Image (cartoon, rainbow, N blue to C red):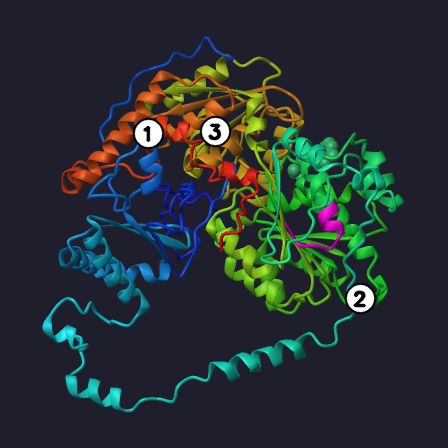
Amino acid sequence: MSDWEEEYDEDGVAIAGPSPVVSAQRTEWRPPSSFGSKGSVYLGGKFGVNEQRNESDWRNLRNQHGDTNPTDHLMCSDPDSGRGRRGGGSRSGTGRPVLLSVENSLIGRVIGRGGVKIRELQESSGARIKINRGDYEGEVLIFGSSDVQQKAKDMIEELISGSASGPRFNSGSERSGVRSKSCWPASSLQTSAGTATAPIDWTSIRENRQKYETMKWQDLPPLKKNFYIEAKSVASRSAEEVTAWRKENNNIFVDDLKEEDKRVIPNPVYTFQEAFDHYPGIMENIQRVGFQKPTPIQSQAWPIVLQGLDLIGIAQTGTGKTLSYLLPGFIHMDQQPVRRDKKSGPGMLVLTPTRELALQIEAECNKYSYKGFKSICVYGGGDRRAQIKMVTSGVDIVIATPGRLNDLQMNELINLRSITYLVLDEADRMLDMGFEPQIMKIILDIRPDRQTVMTSATWPAGVRRLARSYLKDPMMVYVGTLDLAAVNTVQQTVLFVQEEEKKAYVFDFIHNMEPLDKVLIFVGKKIVADDLSSDLCLRGVAVQSLHGDREQCDREEALQDFKDGRVRILVATDLASRGLDVHDITHVFNYDFPRNIEEYVHRVGRTGRAGRSGASVTLVTREDWRWAAELIHILERAGQEVPEELVLMAERYDKHQREKEMFPAKSRGGGGGGGGGGSRGARENGGGVWGRKEGRNRGESNWHF
Ligand code: AMP
């Protein structure tokens, strides 16, 4: 199975992730407003911003954690967020570091085997160089005087451009361009240099590719995409009214990401009627399920998607994002010029990261009986044979996890050529799970003039790249603070404990539960989920557990038991942090701190749903100090009380980080944390974890490829 509960080291780095690329913590820092100009250079990748964005007398705050550094690692956090958090001043050298963004595949050239290259670079240039790996690209930070920075930058650029097979600044022989440490005799090197092969004719390769593409798609049936008829009431809304509406509705931000000839951003619809007046079948369904009005993302997404435009929806599960693409998708499929019975395969494909989400989307899909569309859920772990049977018997909508669908595709069991409406749901999660290669293969078989909708909870570099590759001139709807608005309804308590005290805390919590309480306990590892749930069972507590090592049927049963209230305690890994739509969870108990702060918001958002209030309890140990600043930011934005201990923790971590930068050797000896950092400065700056610049609301484009 594709298990995304892999173990993480102290830096949130997957120790054994599905992707061969070592992924750094997903929490992203926020580039400064001057990013991309002064001091930053781009090499083979690009940065931008992403964002997102008591019970209890029984609990006593404790001041148990110390400030020794729990971890040691090579990476450092960003210069600018660090600088901001520390109230100005550079970390080392004479000014701000120069920042080079480098694709991960090239970072090895800078580091060299066992760090040889980076040491050489430092010695030769006199600069201090730090590497900060990301999911797909990393940062090289160069500290020192500007001369020294320039020298190091030139050397690194040369290394990366591949013009030097070894650093020319190293020795006399290398200066002449011959690798001194080559295992080949000089004569053979000369011989091979002499037999130069003919240059590759890229123009003809490109032309051939184009010809092949044209041939591949030449006999496609015609495609219709625009089905939007703007209601008079919508068209007549003034710009001021629309701006005010967006602000009031989760601070929605809309952007046209087309590079040139920007289009008019459609006004939001306030009612279902305004969006679907011309589609009575859709209206009947909405009346049947009894929804009162569109959610903010639906209001803004429907006019865009119904026009046939590609859309990126940055929104969490729980915002109504599924319907924002499903209903226009129904209309899209129904209104195609080619009759359904003449089509050779499905018309809509929804790719989604997990089985749970796939099943949930299917359930949502099945709530609406539009024109008899048939949907099927295709996911790893499910009955493959039954899925194949369903797929081949003719379906309209396929909801699939990328791995299983790619398997069916490779075995020619599904025809994707007929798909005209593609959804990449929770794109960030799919990338986290290493599904990019499968997504790429799947999309290769889908016609390029399709309509594509992508949703993601965050907007990191990988998702931006995915969007650039697979969407055409999209518009973006960003549901700003909804995640935080959701957690605004949750009373969040943070407790400082030692690792060995955690069980006592959770038992105490359960002991004090009211009969109607329902608690979701999050743990970091599958083994902890098993351990904790069996301990609870032994104490006679009815409990279920949910994690990736359990059989699919057991997982479904666990969830159903929890939903139906047969058990009121579910111990789960982050498999349950997103997408689970259980309305009556009263408490979220973070037994282990999540592996990044975004996950914290997802977890906490499992309670306080559908207008209810909820409470969360988070156990924080000294090992979690790297998250303190970001947690403060979340608590503050959600109007929660910030424990003084957390502020002190953030400051200690910040201090430790600065010391580590100033005295790398010393702090390496003593361990050392990584990432995060900062305290008050971060908060004053609006924090960096969500990566959303406030400037976006002022109309700055965030299409940073
Ligand atoms: P989603 O974010 O798509 O996972 O949706 C979360 C829940 O909200 C689902 O149970 C939907 O059925 C429900 N929902 C979707 N749209 C609306 C709406 N306009 N009003 C009320 N509930 C909705």
The percent position of residue 631, horizontal first and vertical second, equals 42, 28
Q: Mark 2 vs ligand 1: CB under 8 Å?
A: no
Whether residue 363 is visible = no
In the rendered structure, which disc, 2 or 3, sits on the residue that comes first in sequence?
Answer: 2
Q: Which residue is mark 2?
A: 343
The percent position of residue 210, horizontal first and vertical second, equals 60, 78
Cα–Cα span, label 1 and label 3: 27 Å
Q: Which residue is mark 1?
A: 625
Cα–Cα span, label 2 and label 3: 50 Å
Q: Which stretch did the figure color magenta? A: 303-312
Quarter of the image for residue 619 reads top left
Marks 2 and 3: CB-CB under 8 Å?
A: no
Does 144 sit left or right of 56 as displayed?
left
Determine whether 145 is above or below 181 in the image. above
The percent position of residue 487, horizontal first and vertical second, equals 55, 26
Amino acid type at image mark 1: Trp
Whether residue 509 is visible = yes
Which circle marks residue 533 in the picture?
3
Which circle marks residue 192 in the picture?
none
Amino acid type at image mark 3: Ser
Secondary element type, mark 3:
helix
